[in-house]
Amino acid sequence: MGRTAKLSEIETYVDEISGACPTMSDSVQAFPSLGESDGDACLFNGLLSTVDVQLGTATVLRCQAPPGSKKHGMFYRSPLRRATDNSGYEAFFSRDMACGVLAAYATPFVDSALDCQFKLSAQRWMYWINHNRACAIKKPKWLGGGCAIRSPMYRYAPDDRSDITPTMWALMGRVWRHKDWEESPQMKKYAGCDGDISIIEAEKCDLGYPLHLKVVQAYIKFLLWQSRKYSMRVGEIAHERLPENLFYEFVAKRTITDDMIDRYLEMKPPVDQKWGHSWLWEKSEVTHERINKSCGWDFVFMGKLILRYA
């Protein structure tokens, strides 16, 4: 079978499974999910948005609290958790979920209307971030209570997994500059600090989601056409550590080879498979057992990535 025929087979496969992959709903609209879990919806829908899954883009935007709500501008892990103000869960958000938002902002599939939506979303996000630092020292009740001194650390959400690190400020700044949005002082202060440290972290972090997060950050830089040297090196390190992972290989090579096409076709689950709860590309291994637990959206993402860059 020639390359063109193989790509046609991938296109047909992606179209067929897209309508069967698992979704959840916030009572307004269904959104892609990992089986019956919505805890990482913001991240994976952000990745889907970069390959023109429009439902992924819409999902990320619906993760943000709307004007008039108590946490106006803050992002949640999913639209459902936003609708319930995270009822029943401890973690509102995290830095890996923030990468999902940044991936959506960086998608090349954008028209003027969506670009305006992104800009407004970013402004609302920064408003929440700037006005919701944790309280370091509280006023005594006899002085009226409230906060006397705010923490110098900014955060994405009111939990301990959401502090904004210098490398995240640097990545946000890259997206803001690419979009020609007004950068915050923190973005300017930490500009470029996500170079050497990204390589060190990719070499030292655990396989699984920590390494996947580093590669997602490198992938965002690829979408922005920034930091080519460092982002490719992160991809190369990840590919060396887990050569079976097609996403890591793409970020390392920034192209789609015939071998990658063949391996995708060999490992893709059957169309009628009962979809599970796993995003294969974030796992510490690529095995038949892991593939059998695929949520399907991971193969939609990789299939569309192959079709775009082959």
Image (cartoon, grey):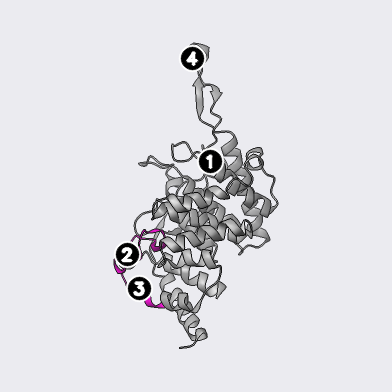
Assess whether mark 3 and mark 4 are in contact (beta carbons under 8 angstroms): no
Q: Mark 1 points at which residue?
A: 165
Which label's residue is closer to the chain start, 4 or 3? 4
Q: Which amino acid does label 3 sit on?
A: Pro
Element type where label 1 sits in the image: loop
State the residue at coordinates (49%, 53%). Answer: 214
Q: Mark 4 points at which residue?
A: 140
Kindly report the distance in space between the C-alpha atoms of the residues bearing marks 2 and 3: 10 Å
Front residue of 185/239: it is: 239
Residue 262 % position (x, y): 43, 79
Q: Mark 3 points at which residue?
A: 269
Magenta span has 301?
A: no
Q: What residue type is labelled 2?
A: Arg
Element type where label 2 sits in the image: helix
The answer to whether 192 is drawn above or below residue 21 in the figure is: above
User: Is label 2 or label 3 in front?
Assistant: 2
Assess whether mark 4 and mark 1 are in contact (beta carbons under 8 angstroms): no
User: Is label 3 or label 1 in front?
Assistant: 1
Residue 62 % position (x, y): 51, 52
Residue numbers of the magenta segment: 265-289
Residue 290 circle label: 2
Kindly report the distance in space between the C-alpha atoms of the residues bearing marks 1 and 2: 32 Å
Secondary structure mostly seen in magenta is loop
Which label's residue is closer to the chain start, 3 or 1? 1
Which label's residue is closer to the chain start, 1 or 2? 1
Which label's residue is closer to the chain start, 2 or 3? 3
Q: In this view, does 192 lie to the left or right of 92?
A: right
Front residue of 286/272: it is: 286
Which label's residue is closer to the chain start, 1 or 4? 4
Residue 14 % position (x, y): 45, 74
